[in-house]
Amino acid sequence: MTGAVLLTGASGLLGTWLRRKAPEGVEVVGLTHRTGLGSAGGVIADLRDSIAVVSAVNTVGPSLMLHAAYSHDQESIVGATENVVDAAQRAGAAVLFVSSDAVFSGDGSPRGEDARPDPIWSYGRWKAQAEAVVAERAEGSAIVRLPLIVSIDPDDHVVARIRRGAALDEPTAWFDDELRQPAAAPELADALWRIALLAPADRAGAWHLPGPETLSRYEIAQRVIAALDLDATAIRAEGTPLSANRPRHLAIDDRRARDRIGWSPSRVLRGTLPP
């Protein structure tokens, strides 16, 4: 890789791990929304503002845009991705977009990298729309679909919510009938960098990085309280409301990642997270 990597969402959970795991010799410039990265430098831009995104990209002059920003509204997912891709195309930079297993319906059938998205909830629909933008506007781009991300320091949203509830003596509830394939943030960051460093033709297309186990959200929460040495009463199980249109069993196949980058993830929160 001859130029810098411009990393969106650099101060977020995944962005933090991507900065920590950046390979030696790779220049990573973090792009954040409001708060800078202190001594780490970087640039600040609202990804929903096309002019601000173009300015940030022109300032850095990256060879790759690693678009890992996380949001939960349409404009910050679809609109922001349009701005990132358009600015990258103007600058001649490649694009690696971090997407989600939620682009699938969650019917329990494992989906390969070439499977057509069929989301049933808003977040998945917006991610699928953003994927289409990347695929249509950025030739040779890569789309990497991740499962639930598990992290301690920085805490993922499950860990943070359980900590808060335990501190307030207010047990938190977790669905015991929604199944996912969680993976550890450090391992996901390593895998994303292995994909990013591939030659452009080898990097292009869709990738899946699921964890090795299928766990309910409640089972993940059980592992969290064990890792944090909290009492079992800090969490409780509940079923997904019948009225909720949410994916119940997301399953993605990782054959390409296993074959091409040696993806072999660990079971989450068994012992300690990988360093």
Image: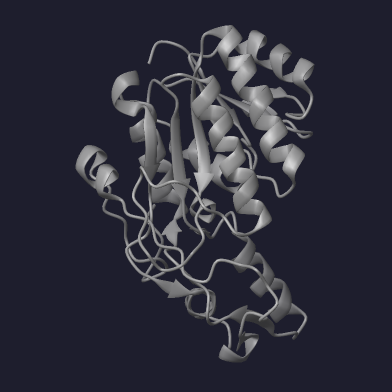
**Place of residue 67 in the rendered image (x, y in percent of width and height, measured from the top left):** 56, 32
Q: Is residue 199 visible?
A: no
User: Residue at image x 43%, y 57%?
Assistant: 184
Q: Is residue 34 left or right of residue 184?
A: right
Is 160 above or below relative to 226?
Answer: above
- Looking at the rendered image, the quarter that the N terminus falls into is top left
User: Residue at image x 68%, y 73%?
Assistant: 244
Q: Nearer the viewer, residue 248 or 55?
A: 248
Q: Is residue 180 left or right of residue 67?
A: left
**Place of residue 188 in the rendered image (x, y in percent of width and height, measured from the top left):** 41, 47
Q: Is residue 263 left or right of residue 192?
A: left
Is 102 above or below relative to 218?
Answer: above
Scheme by which the image is coloured: one colour
User: Residue at image x 46%, y 67%?
Assistant: 107
As drawn, the residue found furthest toward the bottom would be 233
Q: Nearer the viewer, residue 187 or 91?
A: 91
Name the quadrant containing residue 162.
bottom right
User: Residue at image x 53%, y 51%?
Assistant: 103
**Place of residue 89 in the rendered image (x, y in percent of width and height, measured from the top left):** 56, 13
Is 28 above or below relative to 211?
Answer: above
Is 139 above or below relative to 131?
Answer: above
Name the quadrant containing residue 38.
top right
Q: Is residue 220 left or right of residue 76?
A: left
Number of numbered labels in the structure image: 0
**Place of residue 68 in the rendered image (x, y in percent of width and height, measured from the top left):** 57, 37
Q: Is residue 262 visible?
A: yes
As drawn, the residue found furthest toward the left would be 259
